[in-house]
Image (cartoon, rainbow, N blue to C red):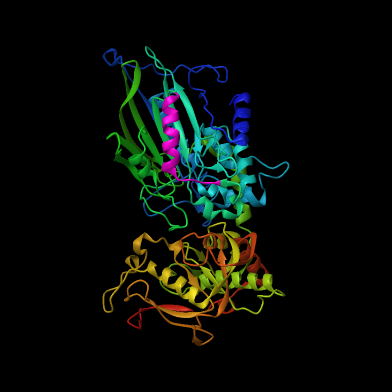
Amino acid sequence: MPLNRRKFLKRSAITGAGVAIAGTAAVPSAQAAPAKKGPEHPKNPKDAKRCSLTVMGTTDLHGHVFNWDYFKDAEYSDAAGNAMGLARVSTLIEQVRKEKGRDNTLLLDAGDTIQGTPLTYYYAKVDPITAKKGPVHPMARAMNAIGYDAVALGNHEFNYGIETLRKFESQCDFPLLGANALDAKTLKPAFPAYFMKTFKVKGGPPVKVAVLGLTNPGIAIWDKAYVQGKLTFPGLEEQAAKWVPKLRSMGADVVVVSAHSGTSGTSSYGDQLPYLEDAAAEVAKKVPGIDAILVGHAHQEIPELKVKNEKTGKTVVLSEPLCFAERLSVFDITLVFNKGKWDVESVSASLRNAATVADDPKITKLLRAEHAKVVAYVNQVVGTATETLTTVDARYKDAPIIDLITKVQEDVVKEALAGTAYAALPVIAQASPFSRTSEIPAGKVTIRDLSSLYVYDNTLVAKLMTGAQVRAYLEYSAEYYVQTPAGAAVDVDKLTNAKNRPDYNYDYVSGLQYDIDVAQAPGSRIKNLTYNGAALDDAQQFVMAVNNYRANGGGDFPYVASAQELWSESTEIRTRIAEWVTAKGELDPKDFSSVDWKLTRDGVPMF
């Protein structure tokens, strides 16, 4: 990138102004080097008034540079034969550029870039990019080398705080877009709202493509500690309706939205915010003037979804590539020159599979050293386990491995509240079965073993709750189970995820004893709820240790978000688990395991 363009991007991020940027593969300008000559359009004289371009997209990379599983210390593999990582998808990108002509392509991402693997954790916390002489973030190095044009902000971009995000932004040779990430005081975009690239067409005027970046309003809840009072996040539909006409008035012939938002039209934060979490299809339906949407956030695979705009009747094409760079979305756009301007004639979308190609050696060589550092870090031994612990059946049985999380959280909160007015209150804790494959093997325990148990960078919060509120909390959590009559056959793969409730929105609560009767309707499943052997007193006060996602309203669990906060910290729960195991030296279930709950049907234990 020319130096003056880099400075322009940095300046725009500080002022919050949206910026228009001529791509380096576009018409030469004062801020762009002369474009290399690509394939000429049109190729057929009969198509003298037509041209085509291609937009490629990834999303939810979550720090995956290589096809490597840091938790298993091995090449990544799954039952579907997928492969992942920027090194792998880079090969696909180069294939498309070769097919279409590099100067006829645009490369985007729809967010969630700098959180999700030990690699990203390492460069945020262990060897942070924010240090005085800190390193360049591996994701910035890889994406710069691959040649991304623009990236939408994801909600996980904010997990390490605004300082880390701004540092990452300064290291990128492309803008981070967020038209609905506004400065809380000025209500102007705190990041560039859009990106514009001009494509040269032989025999006709240039084609201008505008990319509008939209992020997830849930950031206001999930990372409230970092953004409250600093940034605000209005709805995608609202901001798209504001910006798309502006982009058209600026001469955009094609408008593409890169949205860190799924297509389902639902939210996991209930009525805490008036905006949808998964709003991409709604944006296509309600906001005229959009041609295509690169979808993110939901970790789903959508080759092509056509949505008719309610106002114009025009079809908008959406595509979501599978997360972790396992897929590449490819939008092929054809335009026709009509009455002195370019009109989009057709848009089609498809996916390319990263498992069909090899790693790009350029990216492999570029980040080999950073990868090796992280592998060494996660393989540090912190203790020994007396037996194997696993999450295989943790969704439907009280598993000791989840009790480890709640025990650590209880101990940390009790120590933090010692000597305070709340020291005498009983401490209970929540934890979720994040993974279905995590295992701590008998013998040596490493950081990667513990990291696989707690895959998110959550921190710990202590909330003041009553017995009645805890009861309601448990009832809501129990909605995770599919209603299953007594005597009916049980398929554990179909027992959970009722109403598409993900595993991370099902909670154990330690320190209490209770049954979950899945034969009953949601809302009346918690039975025999006791504390210290006696029926739970609804007026009893508890200190509940919860992760910051839950404390801020993630999952829309009742009462917890509005409950009084007694204490919080910035150290990750994963780190607290490692500290606890290191201090003990030995990981023995007798030190942390307890049977707090079980599934029943009409009072009869299911297992």
Residue sitting at the far front: 186
Question: Between residues 551 and 239, which one lies in front from this camera angle?
Answer: 239
Q: Residue at x 53, y 58 (%)?
A: 455
Q: Position of residue 9 (x, y in %)?
A: 59, 31
Is residue 240 located in the magenta-colored stretch of the structure? Answer: yes
Question: Does 1 appear above or below 233?
Answer: above
Quadrant assignment, res 386: bottom right
| Magenta segment | 232-250
Q: Main secondary structure of the magenta part?
A: helix
Question: Does 50 appear above or below 524?
Answer: above
Q: Position of residue 371 (x, y in %)?
A: 59, 46
Is residue 542 located in the magenta-colored stretch of the structure? Answer: no
Q: Position of residue 346 (x, y in %)?
A: 30, 29
Residue 91 seen by the camera = no
How many numbered marks does the figure carry?
0
Question: Between residues 264 and 150, which one lies in front from this camera angle?
Answer: 264
Report the side of 197 relative to 460 (left or right).
left
Residue 89 seen by the camera = yes
Q: Quadrant of the N terminus?
A: top right
Question: Between residues 348 and 421, which one lies in front from this camera angle?
Answer: 421
Q: Residue at x 51, y 57 (%)?
A: 72
Report the side of 312 relative to 502 (left or right).
left
Quadrant assignment, res 288: top left
Question: Does 208 appear above or below 283?
Answer: above
